[in-house]
Image (cartoon, grey):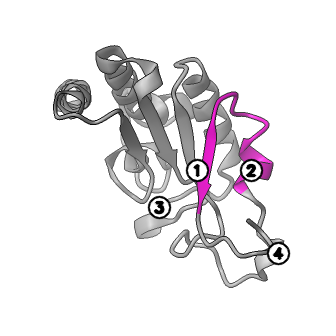
Amino acid sequence: SELPGIVAAYGQAARNAIAAGFDGVEIHGANGYLLEQFLQSRSNKRTDAYGGSIENRARLMLEATRAAVDAIGADRVGIRLSPYGRANDSGEDDPMPLYTYVIGELNKLGLAYLHLIEPRASGAGQREVDHQDVPSGCETVRPLWRGTLITSGNFRTDSA
């Protein structure tokens, strides 16, 4: 399996970033990239330890994030998530059980921050809805996340 090498590469990439003079790294767990592909039930059809249950689908993201934390320290690692995203037809019909678990596990790592893509962000996969009818990520995620929370995505003067 290639997965142990991928996890190790996250740790090495974090070390490389610090060696290159960066202050920290952001693990990209959104927008249809690899970690989100494993996380989402629509894209992850595996039947091994990395597929099926929420815990298994979250495994690669958590292992990769932990590898970065082990390499450079939790205070230099953040993660970007998009619970309401639908990149490449992925996503969850009800994302909260999945992201409640993921955020709970990420809390244990003591990360520098969580970067949350708001559900109303352009390209987040929301159907055409009235802007005020779309829930804020802060409303759904803030109660779960114990650390610094950054949000992005299609803010207007009435929602910023």
Q: Quadrant of the N terminus?
A: top left
The residue tagged 3 is 90
Q: How many marks?
A: 4
Image x and y of residue 142, in percent = 75, 41
Ranked by sequence position, the earlier of labels 4 and 3 is 3
- Residue 132: mark in rendering: 4
Tag 2 and tag 1, C-beta contact below 8 Å? yes
Ranked by sequence position, the earlier of labels 2 and 3 is 3
Residue 69: in sight, yes or no? Answer: yes
102 magenta-colored: no
Amino acid at dot 1: Leu
Tag 4 and tag 2, C-beta contact below 8 Å? no
How far apart, in angstroms, are the residues tagged by discs 3 and 1?
A: 17 Å
Q: Find the magenta span and give its range.
A: 137-152
The residue tagged 1 is 116
Judge from the rendering whether residue 24 lies leftward or rightward of residue 99; answer left or right: left
Which of discs 2 and 3 lies nearer the camera? The answer is: 2
